[in-house]
Image (spheres, rainbow, N blue to C red):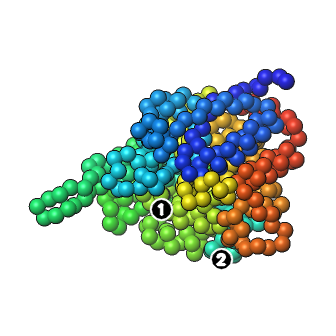
Amino acid sequence: MSSPAVTYRLVVVPGDGIGPEVISAGRRVLEATAQIFGFGLDWTEVLVGGVAIDAYGTGVRDEDIDKCAAADAVFFGAIGDPRFSDPKAKVRPEQALLRLRKDLCLYANLRPVTVQPILAASSPVRESLVKDVDLLIVRELTGGLYFGKPSEQRVTPNGREVVDTLTYTEHEIRRVVKLGFELARGRRKKLTSVDKANVLESSRLWRTIVDEVKADYPDIELEHRLVDACAMSLVTRPAQFDVMVMENLFGDILSDEASVLAGSLGMLPSASLGERRTEHGLFGLYEPIHGSAPDIAGQDIANPLATILSAAMMLRWSLGQPTAAEAIERAVTATLDAGYRTPDLVAATGEVAGIKKVGTQAMGDAVVAALRSTEPQGLGAAEGVMR
C-alpha cells in the first residue's frame, strides 16, 4: 500500500462522560474518510477534564496544552463530571476548557445550525418554521464575563457580595466581528450583530465597532438586534437569520437555544478557531455542542452525529479537505434518510415505521457504511490534497 500524500497530526481529547463514546465513533468515521481520500492521520491522545483531575490533580497539564498547540487540530469529546460540581471546588473540569481556549488563542466559536429535512418534524419548533433554517452563530470565545478580573465572592461588613467583570478590548471585538462579515460574504450576505446596547456600555462599544467594520463590507446587509428580542426571534422566525455574531455570554446562551431547532443537541457540531495558520489551514478545536451527559455515559445510547459533523468541520477548516468534509456530511444525511436513529432522535419522533433504533457505535458504523457505499475508493484523493 502506498504512503498517504499527506498525514495530519491530530490531538484527540475523549474527556468525560459520553465523550469517549462519541469520539470513538468519530474517529472511525475519520479513519474511513482518510482511507477513501488518501491521507493519513497521526493521533495523540491527552487527558482533559475530570479524568485529568483524577490522574494528575489538574484539569489539563501544561505539557498537554503544548501537544495541542503543536498539532494541526484538536478533536474534542466532552468534559464535565458531577463529582466536581461543587461551586466551592478549587479545581473543576470546565476550567480546563476555558484554559485551552485562552492558551490556544481560540477566539471564535462557530456553531452552524441546520435542520436535516428528515428530522424537521421532530423539532419542538413548528415544522414550517424550521424548514429553511441555515444559520451560523459566531461567538466570541476568550473575552467577556468568563475571563474578566476581578471575578470573586467576598464578605463585607454589609454581608456577602459578588463581582464578575465584563471586559473587552477593541481588538477582541474587531477581529471576531470581521470574521462574522467574512463568513457572511461566503453565505447569504447577511450579518446580525447581537448586543444589549440599550443597557451595557460594553455593548455600546461593540455596536460602534460593528458599524466601523461594516464600512469595509458594503455588500453585506447588517442588522443590530438586542439579545432579548433576538432570543424570541430565534424560535419564532429562525429562518430569517444567516450569520450571527455576538459576545461570549450571549453566544453561549443563544447557541444552546438555537440547538433545539435541530431536534437534538446530539446533531450540532462546533469549531473553535484562532488566527494561527498551519500548513494546511486554520488551527482549531472541534467538538459537539452537547455536554458530557454523565447520566447516560457507558450505555452506548449517546448520539455521535454532532461529533462526526465536527470532524467534517475539522477537515474543512483545519486540514484543507473540503471534499472529504462534504462526503461525511452526505453520509450523515444518507444514514438518517435510511432510518437510523439513536434514542434521543427516537424520543423526539416516537416509534414509527422504518426507524432503526441503534446505539452510539452502531450509528458510527452506519455512517462509515454510507461513506463507503457512496464514495468510490480513491475518489477525490488528489483533489483533497491539492490546494
Quarter location, residue 86 = bottom left
Q: Earlier in the sequence, mark 2 or mark 1?
A: 2
Identify which residue is drawn at 31% across, 59% down. Answer: 201
Instruction: Please state the horizontal and vertical placement of residue 368, each as a whole percent of the image.
Output: 79, 46
Query: Which one is in front, 347 or 67?
Result: 347
Q: Quickly name the residue at label 1.
A: 253
**On screen, 223 above or below 176?**
below
Q: Residues within 10 Å of mark 2 (few under 14, many from 20)?
A: some
**On screen, 286 above or below 188?**
above
Quick one: quadrant of the N terminus? top right
Instruction: Please state the horizontal and vertical placement of residue 77, each as a whole percent of the image.
Output: 58, 47
Does dot 2 land on a helix, a strand or a loop? loop
Identify which residue is drawn at 44% across, 53% down. Answer: 83
Quarter location, residue 323 = top right
Identify which residue is drawn at 44% across, 41% down. Answer: 53
Q: Is residue 306 visible?
A: no
Q: Is residue 341 visible?
A: yes
Relative placement, left or right, of 206 versus 340 is left
Relative placement, left or right, of 285 versus 133 is left
Amino acid tagged 1: Ile
Identify which residue is drawn at 60% across, 52% down. Answer: 18
Quarter location, residue 378 = top right
Instruction: Please state the horizontal and vertical placement of residue 385, each as a whole percent of the image.
Output: 74, 31
Q: Quickly name the residue at label 2.
A: 126
**Image mark count:** 2
Whether residues under marks 2 and 1 lie with C-beta atoms below 8 angstroms apart, the answer is: no
